[in-house]
Image (tube, rainbow, N blue to C red):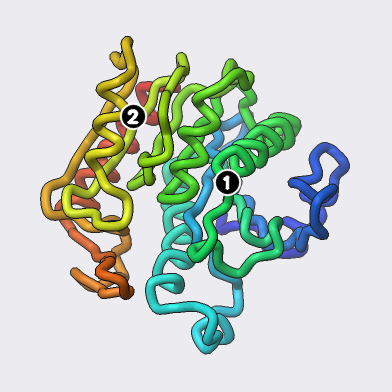
């Protein structure tokens, strides 16, 4: 079935199981989205963590006219909703987190949210989703894009309880501030070879520094830019300061195949 409407999401997220950081800021609850397949029983579940642009609202026409959102923001915000629907069609429950809303932000690109802060949201999302009757609490996966991918890597590197998580995927994450990576969770990292926003070499250097990195799979797609999996994006979009984003069909197709395979073998 399609993603639950805002009213259902509001009722679900109003349960007192987690607060999503409400102790720090007032949270607009209906901007988190829950996607639930029609299949019965406990299902594999993905905690999806978007990048700094946030998640598209249901009112896309108003969003498109918002002067605070650039063209690339709109592309990324809509992309995360589209991917959640595709993952739902593959049989996964998807909890798509709007951390920007929880932090009172429209966009966090000018001042990215700290990776440890994102990791706290991941912890809360795992705890909350595990209480849902249709979620298999022992078959959880985490996927993060860009800033969200950095948060996933931060969550993995530490003393957090990772026992319920089968896999973690970081898609074009910035790794320049990541100094270590210690985890028992299988990791997939998908990188654009020509990414000028999140340098792919920093992620490769990070992985190479891990003494036992056999559970880490890295895929680097030659010529691919940041946002290479956004089908609605042009091949290259200049976003200023010498930075670009852009869709590359071959990288998008290969990365989607790699992601689905990684999820299936991790279940």
Mark 2, residue position: 262
The tag earlier along the polypeptide, 2 or 1, is 1
Horizontal relation, residue 6 to residue 236: left or right? right
User: Residue extending furthest right?
Assistant: 16
Mark 1, residue position: 114
- Looking at this view, is 41 or 234 the one in front? 234
In the rendered image, residue 221, in percent from the top left (x then y), is placed at 16, 45
Above or below — where is 46 with respect to 233? Answer: above
Horizontal relation, residue 195 to residue 168: left or right? left
- Looking at this view, is 162 or 116 the one in front? 116
In the rendered image, residue 53, in percent from the top left (x then y), is placed at 50, 64
The image quarter in which residue 158 lies:
top right
Image point 23% across, 58% down: which residue? 225
* Residue count near mark 2 (Cα–Cα under 10 Å), binned few <14, some 14–19, many ≥20: some
In the rendered image, residue 37, in percent from the top left (x then y), is placed at 55, 45
In the rendered image, residue 258, in percent from the top left (x then y), is placed at 26, 36
């Amino acid at each position: 079935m399609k993603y639950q409407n805002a009213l259902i999401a509001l009722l679900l997220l109003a349960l007192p199981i987690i607060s999503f950081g409400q102790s720090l800021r007032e949270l607009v609850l209906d901007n988190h989205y829950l996607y639930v397949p029609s299949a019965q029983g406990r299902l594999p579940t993905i905690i999806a963590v978007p990048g700094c642009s946030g998640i598209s609202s249901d009112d896309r026409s108003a969003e498109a006219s918002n002067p605070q959102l650039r063209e690339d923001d709109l592309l990324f915000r809509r992309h995360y909703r589209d991917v959640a629907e595709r993952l739902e069609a593959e049989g996964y429950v998807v909890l798509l987190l709007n951390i920007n809303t929880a932090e009172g932000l429209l966009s966090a690109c000018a001042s990215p949210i700290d990776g440890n802060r994102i990791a706290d949201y991941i912890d809360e999302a795992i705890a909350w989703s595990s209480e849902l009757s249709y979620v298999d609490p022992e078959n959880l996966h985490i996927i993060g894009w860009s800033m969200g991918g950095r948060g996933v890597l931060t969550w993995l590197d530490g003393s957090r309880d990772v026992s319920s998580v089968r896999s973690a995927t970081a898609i074009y994450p910035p790794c320049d501030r990541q100094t270590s990576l210690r985890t028992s969770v299988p990791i997939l990292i998908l990188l654009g070879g020509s990414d000028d926003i999140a340098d792919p070499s920093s992620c490769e250097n990070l992985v190479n520094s891990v003494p036992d990195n056999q559970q880490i799979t890295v895929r680097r797609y030659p010529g691919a830019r940041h946002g290479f999996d956004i089908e609605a994006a042009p091949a290259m979009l200049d976003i200023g300061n010498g930075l670009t984003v852009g869709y590359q069909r071959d990288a998008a197709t290969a990365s989607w195949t790699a992601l689905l395979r990684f999820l299936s073998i991790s279940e």
